[in-house]
Amino acid sequence: MTLPTTEPTAAIDAQPSRRELPTKKRGNGGIVKFFESYALLILLLAMVVFFSVWPQTSEVFPTAANLRILVASQAVLGVVALGALIPLICGEFDLSVGAVAALSAVLVAETLSAGSPVLVGIAVAVGAGAVVGLANGLIVTRMHVNAVVCTLGMSTIVVGYIRQDTGGLAPPSLIPASLTDFGTGTIVGIPTIFIMLLVIAGATYFILDHTPIGRRIYALGSNPAAAELVGLRTRRLRFVVLFVGAVLCGIAGLLYVARAGGADPKLSGTFTLPALAAAFLSAASVRPGRYNVWGAIIAIYFLAVLNNGLNLAGAQPYISDYLSGGALILGVALAAILRRRNQRA
């Protein structure tokens, strides 16, 4: 017996992207909900104030130069985190995000250094992400390989290819000035690459929260069994999120070349853990219990401000590893706790 699909699917598409609380429960509950939703943002702002007045960092941290560097340096990581976030919303874990960004950066640097136009470099970046995303999506949805196993294996393969291609050495860095000017430039004092992050984040937010496919992705991640019953094409959705996430990581590799003026073959390990930590921590901010775009962006800059302030104070470099690992564990724990509480509500 075939279950009807049109009406239930339409019902999911028609659902509001936010859950409204009953009016009679508002008041003090609304204040608590506000602070719960924006606690991480409030902590971020509090840390900015603290490092701005703390004697050990007050001379450097609040300067315009440091803040511009801080904002711009996290833009590439922000795009990688969005690439990890999209599959995560759907219940899939992509551990290849850092490797895809590294592959894209290396191929873009090699292509542009050989004299190719910037448009060709853009195509190479998107293509690199698309190839890996296509492979991940097909292996997970057609061969039924667990996404963690698949993407971990794919990450290892990609890193191996990068080592073979580069010999472990950075590729030539003859990057056109038009691209590096974009990566290091500013518009009214705001780094251009940060504006690019906001544009990508805004587009991702709109698609996930205000389009039918975005609501279907959230529905699949929230309850896979129910999504199957109402007729959602779950296999196709899982393929799409893995593919799109990898393409975003390919774009991140291009932005890294624009920002750094070259590529680093060891880039994979730099991005993977912080990107996943930010993606998981997003469930503890803005929309508690639900992975979301702006929560991920806040999480990135929360960790960045903390790391930057501690580095200026003379903290050892390994402190950032502790913070990233702890943030990943905390993010997973908070997401699980908040999700269970929302399901009981």
Image (spheres, rainbow, N blue to C red):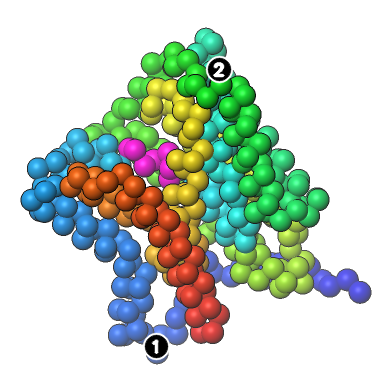
Q: Quadrant of the N terminus?
A: bottom right
Where residue 210 appears, x then y in whole percent? 54, 58
Q: Do the residues labelled 1 and 2 touch (CB within 8 Å)?
A: no
Q: Is residue 136 visible from the viewing direction of this image?
A: yes
Where residue 140 appears, x then y in whole percent? 74, 51
Mark toward the start of the polypeptide (1 vs 2)? 1
Quote the CA–CA distance across marks 1 and 2.
59 Å
Magenta residues (range): 72-78
Where residue 116 appears, x then y in whole percent? 54, 13
Which amino acid type is marked by label 2? Answer: Thr
Residue 298 is labelled as none
Helix, strand or loop at label 2? It is: helix
Specify few, some or many for label 2: CA neighbours under 10 Å numbering under 14, 14-19, or 20 or more. many
How many dots with numbers? 2
Q: Main secondary structure of the magenta part?
A: helix
Picture residue at 30% right of the left edge, 61% below the top: 41
Which amino acid type is marked by label 1? Answer: Lys
The residue under label 1 is: 25
Magenta stretch encompasses residue 138: no
